[in-house]
Amino acid sequence: MRETGLTVIGLDLAARPWRPTGVAVLTAGKIRTSLVFMDEELIRLVVAHYPRLIAIDAPLSLPAGRCCLRPDCDCRRFGISRRCDRELVRQGFRVFWTALPSMVELTCRGVALAGRLRTAGFEVIEVFPGAAQKRLGLPRKQDNRAELARRLADAWGLVLPAGRRLTHDELDAATAAIVGLLYLQGRAEAIGDPAEGQIILPAPA
Ligand SMILES: [Zn+2]
């Protein structure tokens, strides 16, 4: 049965399916997280919750003009970054260019997954949890993961499971889901070129 309440799913996508992808399901004021691996698992989980929106931490588009990310293709002359990437760097965030060799696998997986989900009728946005945490006044997971988890629990309803610590993938997935909720509430800002692909951040305070 489809859930009738407003549900947002946040994903901290791993570059490779054998690395854990963080999943956060935000519904009725609570955020519950888990880890999944294969694309098929991800799709099953999304369909089971039927979210209003899916917010993914991974590049979901290529730099304008590029047809692929192959280093031997002519499209290489269009560069390795998007306007949203460059704008975030200008704002002081540490961003890896979309088509950097170390990012190619993640970008390809993100573009393909977003395409599948959109084809299935879901709304998908790209988010950047590191920047979102800063805008929301949250501690960075690199500085204090336990404090980040506590703040997400107190202010945003993140459910902290007994007996284990949440992983950084789960904390970023929870942050992604929060950005998705803010987006639906009109409390977010889109960075970059709509034709090329944008990154959604919480609106500046
Ligand atoms: Zn190409």
Image: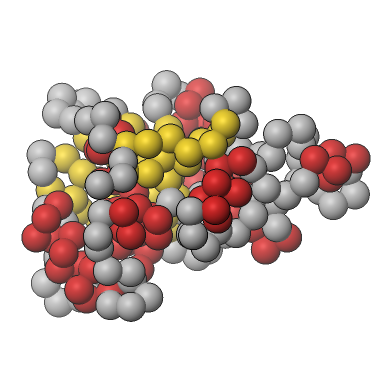
In the displayed structure, would residue 47 be above or below residue 73?
above
Q: Residue at x 23, y 68 (%)?
A: 148
In the displayed structure, would residue 183 be above or below residue 129?
above
Please state which of residues 43 and 33 is positioned toward the viewer in this rendering.
33
Can the viewer see residue 41? Answer: no
Can the viewer see residue 82? Answer: yes
Quadrant (top left/top right/bottom left/bottom right) for the N terminus: top left
Which colour style is shown? secondary structure
Please state which of residues 141 and 53 is positioned toward the viewer in this rendering.
141
Residue 127 at x, y percent in the picture: 42, 45
Location of residue 181 (image quadrant): top left
Residue 182 at x, y percent in the picture: 25, 38
Residue 58 at x, y percent in the picture: 51, 49
Q: How many marks?
A: 0
Q: Residue at x 14, y 52 (%)?
A: 156
Q: Residue at x 21, y 44 (%)?
A: 26
Q: Residue at x 81, y 48 (%)?
A: 70
Residue 94 at x, y percent in the picture: 52, 63
In the displayed structure, would residue 3 be above or below residue 150?
above
Q: Is residue 48 left or right of residue 158?
A: right
